[in-house]
Image (cartoon, helix red, strand yellow):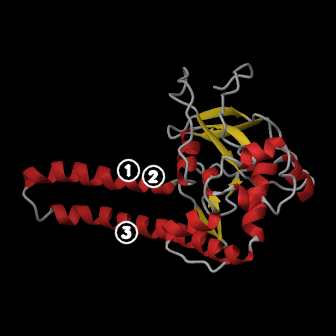
Amino acid sequence: MVNDDTETPDMGTIPKFGCQILGSPSLSKLGIMMGRPLKTGRPTKEIDRLGYAQLLIKVKEGEELPDKTKFATEKDILIKQQAIYKWRVPDAHTAIEIDKPGCLIYKLMTSLKYLKKPLRELNRNYFNDIHHRREIMRTSLEAVPRQLQLMPENLQSSIADGYIKSLSKAMGSLKMRGAMVNDKCLISLNQASKRNKGFLSFEYLGVPITFDRLSSSDFQHLDNVETQQHLLFVSQFTKTVREEIMKGLGIQVTP
């Protein structure tokens, strides 16, 4: 349980990315999927650890991020979560003013014409590959009983235990990676998607990125980067989008 008087965790130099949510273990998995292992807090009485995630999320115009949200943990226990601050989005301009670092990244990625289409393809291929590998593992898991029939009885139990546990664990990790819906990648946090029941749904807005994949040169043409706050934020980006994202994924982009 996260009490109201709980001290706000020290997020270090990680830039604000939409909003900061105190989350369950599934949020930690989500953070790892996005490319950065997230910090974990000190153990509590009811759960071993708290995971922290900073996400750029989309909410309907005029709606307000609730003070309290709930997530189902892996043990199907509802735990109250406290939003560190509210995020009201009456229009796009206000959203940029409230969350300049996160919106600068999103604005940058959508404004570079030569990156827009490749990034969209990367995003689609990334999740398609995840679901393809998951289907392969499911098929392999279903084939285990037939394979065991050909083996001596004294080997069946040991092989079955290790093989099934290994595949099940791998499938469980892929389950948290997201789903394709109408060509958009939706993040599923233990199926916590019904807002009217106290759950907060997240929509993933782009290819997985981390704040160290950009450099100050990528922000030179954008507004509001002259202030000291944004200069400090920009100084953390050491590599460009084109060099870092495209290099590891084997896609060449003509500048």
- Secondary structure under badge 3? helix
Quarter the C terminus occupies: bottom right
Q: Is label 2 in contact with label 1 (beta carbons under 8 Å)?
A: yes
The residue under label 2 is which amino acid type? Ser
State the separation of the CA atoms marked 2 and 1. Answer: 6 Å
**Corner quadrant of residue 50:** top right
Q: Residue at x 36, y 53 (%)?
A: 168
Please give the residue where the numbered disc 1 appears in the rendered image.
169
The image position of residue 23, as x and y in percent, is 63, 38
Is label 2 in a helix, a strand or a loop?
A: helix
Q: CA distance from mark 1 to mark 3?
A: 14 Å
Give the label on residue 136, or none: 3
Q: On the rendered structure, is 145 left or right of 52?
A: left
Tag 3: residue type?
Ile
The answer to whether residue 103 of the structure is visible from this angle is: yes
Query: Mark 1–mark 3 contact, CB under 8 Å?
Result: no
The disc labelled 1 sits on which kind of residue? Lys
